[in-house]
Image (cartoon, helix red, strand yellow):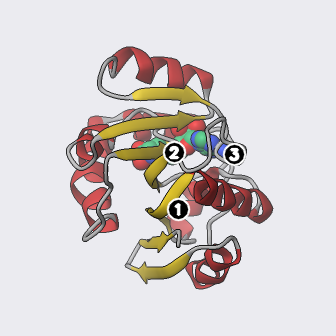
Amino acid sequence: MGMNYFHQLCCRSSLWERASATRIVPWALDGVELGDRALEVGPGYGANVGTLRGRAGALTGLEIDGGLAARLRERQAGRMRVIEGDGTAMPLSDKEFDSVVCFTMLHHVPSPVQQDELFAEAFRVLSPQGVFAGSDGLDRLAFRLMHIGDTCVPVPPVTLSDRLSRVGFRDVEIETGATMFRFRARRP
Ligand SMILES: C[S@@+](CC[C@H](N)C(=O)[O-])C[C@H]1O[C@@H](n2cnc3c(N)ncnc32)[C@H](O)[C@@H]1O
């Protein structure tokens, strides 16, 4: 986990917030219904909160970084529920959500095994017919450079369909763009 200083500066900037809210989230969630209860894993500085709140009944954020969780709780008081915790071992009940989403965070989970644990946890907390969706960066030089001194374990999109199916997801769809991929899958 962890972000280098450049990356921290970038992620908290209004430029990033605008790019994520207007380009990343709408593309990643195009055609996806979030339903009444949505969970965002790794909300960070909260760049996506406004967009997600417009698309879901209620929003919960699960953030591993205690400082970021506290900041978000303070700034988004009354707008979302913020829980400090790990997406690979979610302190949440089974079948609690209609949707689980994450954006630009999977590469911060330090190993494929832990990423698969996160996928299994997303499956567990989803109600039947619930959707897991999101996006992350492709393994490119610029992406690696941004993460020097930082955790960076990009998810190869070609492996993702099998990895999501293995933990139980169905109707898996992966699409690869120029710099990012998006995914969506359903709990049967
Ligand atoms: C690059 S930031 C992206 C933040 C936000 N999703 C966005 O799009 O702006 C990655 C975030 O994921 C969080 N994170 C990393 N590993 C996590 C885990 N295992 N569980 C929950 N959050 C995690 C980090 O603390 C950080 O806030």
**Residue 99 position within the rendered picture, expressed as x and y whole percent measured from the top left:** 42, 55
Q: Nearer the viewer, mark 2 or mark 1?
A: 2
The disc labelled 2 sits on which kind of residue? Glu
Could you tell which of marks 2 and 3 lies nearer the N-terminus? 2
Give the vertical position of 6 relative to 128 (above or below).
Answer: above
Query: In what element is the residue under mark 3?
Result: loop
Q: Nearer the viewer, residue 77 or 99?
A: 99
Residue sitting at 45 percent across and 81 percent down?
173
* Whether residue 135 is visible: no
Residue beneath label 2, please? 96
Q: Dividing the image into four equal quarters, which quarter contains ligand 1?
A: top right
Q: Which mark is residue 149?
A: 3
Q: Secondary structure at mark 2?
A: loop
Mark 1 vs ligand 1: CB below 8 Å: no
Residue 106 vertical placement versus 59 (above, below): below
Q: Check the picture and name the quadrant holding the N terminus.
A: top right
Whole-number angstrom distance, CA of label 2 to CA of label 1: 34 Å
Residue 140 in picture, x, y percent from top left: 54, 72
Name the residue carrying label 1. 143
Judge left or right: residue 42 versus residue 148. left
Bin the neighbour count of mark 1 within 10 Å (Cα to Cα): few under 14, some 14-19, many 20 and up: some
Cα separation between marks 2 and 3 = 36 Å
The mark nearer the N terminus, 2 or 1, is 2
Mark before the other along the chain sequence, 1 or 3:
1
168 or 54, nearer to the observer: 168
Residue 114 image-quadrant placement:
bottom right
Q: Secondary structure at mark 1?
A: helix
Q: Is label 2 in contact with label 1 (beta carbons under 8 Å)? A: no
What's the CA distance linking mark 1 and mark 3?
12 Å
Residue type, label 1:
Phe
